[in-house]
């Protein structure tokens, strides 16, 4: 028979061992969600599966844009969402995109009216689909000149709607928060992408995300005055270059199009493709010898971004990791487990 004190010590040793194992596991206080940014809501079977398995159906849905109409001399809604399928009415957050020009042109006296009109349209669209939303997210890259009007819009909208408000936050607005101001909302959404400068030089880093550019901003995150959720990119694009100058950036010209050997061949530099002839693709004119610099996101890139970013965030605070966006998600690039592993870093 084993003596009682020995059993007691053995029991304590086992507890300490189990505790040590648990502490080695990565703890996460984050859940996942997706943006949907297209005008018509329709997801294929694979996208539905990812939405359900990764985010339990949690969706941030762009309802409409607000832009300034110079001819009419007023702000007006554009690209209003059209529903082609039913939505999960309990896990949906409406998103409204507003151009900075709208607040450049709008008078201060017109701000409250715009807030009321926006709330009315949002309620109408939601009620038609029986959507019961608890919060609204606004996406506007405000400037010093429009800060006061945008912030007044947010205050007015909250007073009218009685909803929780969220606002997207760019990295430069974190670094220079004293100058740019902090929007009067309940939560911010840090857009952790589009941080680098677009460049025609093949050797310059990915402008969607690269650790060097990110490092110039993220040390300011612990002092930011709002609780933050995180938006991470799922998109890729190609930079159209002619004679050393950037012509345009195209999301619709990706690896599939650039891999067409009748039109392109790989250049000497990685992820750069050279046009073999002059032609049109997707309404874009491509001239012989034009270059396309492909900038992509994949699991490895997002994991690198997550690891770098997580070091500067409070892990005790609950966060939502919102992936932008599921409407253009390439299922061959990202799997369900990829999102789970990336989100786990937070």
Image (tube, helix red, strand yellow):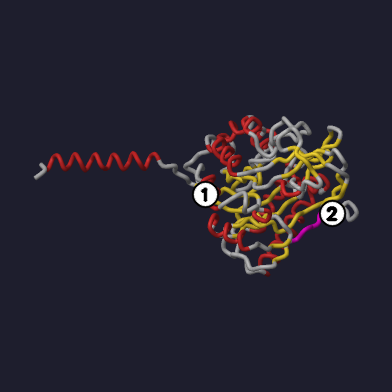
Image quadrant where residue 191 sits: top right
Q: What secondary structure prevails in the magenta region?
A: strand
Give the residue at mark 1: 340
Name the residue: 67% across, 55% down.
95
Which badge, 1 or 2, is on the more N-terminal residue? 2
Residue that protrudes farthest toward the front in the picture: 262
Is any atom of residue 189 visible in this view?
no
- The answer to whether 274 is drawn above or below residue 332 in the figure is above
Q: Nearer the viewer, residue 134 or 194?
A: 194
Q: Nearer the viewer, residue 192 or 125?
A: 192
Classify residue 203 as left or right of residue 134. Answer: right
In the image, residue 79 lies in the stretch drawn in magenta? yes
Name the residue: 68% across, 42% down.
296
* Percent x, y of residue 202: 74, 32
Name the residue: 64% across, 36% down.
174
Give the residue at mark 2: 74
Span highlighted in magenta in the image: 74-80
Q: Nearer the viewer, residue 290 or 305?
A: 290
Is any atom of residue 304 visible in this view?
yes
């Amino acid at each position: 028979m084993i003596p009682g004190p020995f059993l007691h010590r053995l029991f304590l040793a086992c507890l300490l061992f189990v505790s040590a194992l648990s502490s080695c596991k990565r703890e996460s206080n984050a859940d996942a969600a997706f943006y949907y940014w297209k005008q018509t809501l329709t997801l294929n079977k694979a996208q539905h599966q990812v939405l359900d398995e990764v985010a339990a159906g949690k969706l941030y849905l762009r309802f409409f844009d607000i832009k300034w109409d110079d001819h009419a001399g007023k702000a007006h809604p554009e690209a209003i969402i059209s529903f082609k399928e039913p939505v999960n009415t309990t896990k949906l957050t409406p998103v409204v995109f507003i151009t900075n020009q709208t607040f450049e042109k709008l008078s201060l006296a017109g701000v409250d009216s715009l807030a009321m009109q926006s709330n009315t349209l949002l309620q109408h669209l939601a009620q038609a689909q029986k959507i019961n939303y608890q919060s609204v997210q606004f996406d506007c890259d405000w400037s010093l000149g429009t800060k006061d009007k945008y912030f007044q819009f947010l205050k007015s909208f909250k007073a009218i709607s009685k909803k929780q408000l969220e606002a997207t936050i760019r990295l430069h607005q974190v670094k220079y928060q004293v100058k740019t101001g902090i929007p009067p909302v309940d939560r911010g959404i840090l857009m952790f992408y589009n941080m680098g400068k677009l460049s025609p030089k093949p050797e310059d880093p990915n402008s969607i995300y690269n650790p060097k550019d990110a490092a110039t901003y993220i040390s300011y995150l612990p002092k930011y005055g709002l609780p933050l959720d995180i938006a991470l990119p799922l998109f890729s694009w190609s930079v159209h270059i002619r004679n050393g100058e950037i012509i345009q950036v195209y999301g619709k010209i990706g690896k599939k199009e650039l891999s067409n050997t009748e039109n392109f061949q790989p250049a000497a530099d990685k992820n750069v493709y050279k046009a073999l002839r002059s032609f049109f693709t997707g309404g874009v004119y491509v001239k012989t010898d034009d270059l396309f610099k492909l900038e992509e996101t994949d699991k490895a890139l997002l994991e690198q971004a997550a690891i770098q970013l997580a070091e500067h965030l409070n892990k005790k605070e609950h966060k939502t990791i919102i992936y932008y966006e599921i409407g253009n998600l390439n299922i061959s690039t990202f799997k369900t487990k990829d999102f789970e592993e990336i989100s786990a870093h937070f």
